Image (spheres, rainbow, N blue to C red):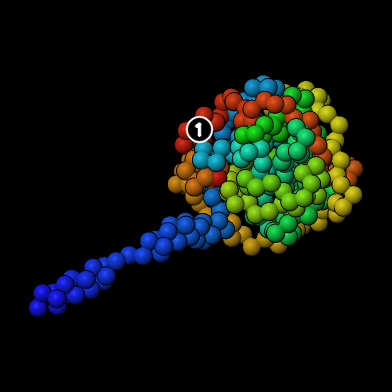
Amino acid sequence: MAKSRNIQRHRIRRRHHVNPRCMALTTVFLPALTLAQDDDEPTSSPSQFSEPFQDQITGLPMERFFGARTSFGFAFALPEVQTAPAGSFIGQLSFPLVNGEGWGSFGLTGDMEGNFILAVWPDGSGGVMASFRQATDEDNPPEVAGDFRVRPLPDGVSVNATSLTYTFLCENCLDSTFGLGTDAASGDAVMGWALSEQPPLGDPSDPGARLGFHERGFGPFTARLGAAATAEFDAIAATALEPVPASANAVAAVAGAFGEGSGDEDSGDEGDGDVGGDDDDDDADDAGGGAVGGGTAGGGAGGGAVGGGGDDGNDSDSDDD
């Protein structure tokens, strides 16, 4: 009988035994599976608005979408009077890097598909590469060229191991055929953003380098363009440097491509939906001629996120990525 009881206890112990290798595999793969399920969902929404911001380098008053969790920022300022048919604006992209690598972008519309975007990343030589893209291929948005140009502002470009800031004049970028024209400059418009902590594939000094998936975050937000008009625009724009060149492989931008998007990206609100910009978007982010598609702008060693009003990292800033 004693032997029988020992066998029974042994069986009970085995019945409750948990294989440590199974636990280890679960610990490793479950988070990855969760990320895989969520990484195609937008991390911001149109209910997140840009907010007032002042660039401390130029002193220019701007509006900015900022994500408190991702620390992605996109700021913009417009002239008081826009020209037709295409208009210009001053923009600033700022976001964190991981070991000096990553890329970020803004887009003229809230849909990722067909969006006209400007992407920037470290060029590997202490500067920043800027490249116009059109998301007609979401796996690798092709570099595009047209009558639009990007001109970096003096002292407005910096990159180091942890952050990147790129301040620029975007000439002839507001074009209704690309989704956002000068007719919308006096009000609000839904724009988009994307962020990755992975470097583009290929030579980082090539404006046509392959962009991977924006796994760090992406989504729409509402840009208060009318509130971004300033009398100081012309003076700052006049200091912009030479346009940066596109690569020889850039293709012509496709008019109307933004209308081919599915619009699914607009549905993912990672914020609480409060108007005025709540930073709790998952990491949702807040609010902030020649064939020129991209180029290199010299970057200083200064830190990335430019301070100033608008983005103090609290959850009232527009949202996060």
Q: Position of residue 92 (x, y in %)?
A: 68, 34
Determine whether 11 is above or below 62 in the image. Answer: below
Quadrant assignment, res 53: top right
Q: Tag 1: Cα neighbours inside 10 Å, few (<14), some, or many (≥20)?
A: some
Check disc 1 and report the residue beneath it.
313
Determine whether 178 is above or below 318 in the image. Answer: below
Q: Position of residue 130 (x, y in %)?
A: 77, 41
Q: Residue furthest front?
A: 3
Q: Nearer the viewer, residue 72 or 177?
A: 72
Q: Nearer the viewer, residue 10 or 238?
A: 10
Q: Position of residue 277 (x, y in %)?
A: 51, 40
Residue at the location (72% across, 48% down)?
200
The amino acid type, in three-letter code, at marker 1 is Gly
Residue at the location (27% across, 70% down)?
14
Of the 4 image quadrants, the one containing the N terminus is bottom left
Element marked by disc 1: loop
Quadrant assignment, res 61: top right
Q: Position of residue 155 (x, y in %)?
A: 74, 24
Q: Nearer the viewer, residue 305 or 50?
A: 305
Q: Examine the rendering and report whether any part of residue 207 can be seen.
A: no
Q: Nearer the viewer, residue 77 or 181?
A: 77
Residue at the location (36% across, 65% down)?
19
Determine whether 229 is above or below 269 in the image. Answer: above
Q: Is residue 248 left or right of residue 64?
A: right
Instruction: State the count of labels.
Output: 1
Q: Examine the rendering and report whether any part of residue 70 can be seen.
A: yes
Of the 4 image quadrants, the one containing the C terminus is top right
Residue at the location (23% across, 73% down)?
11
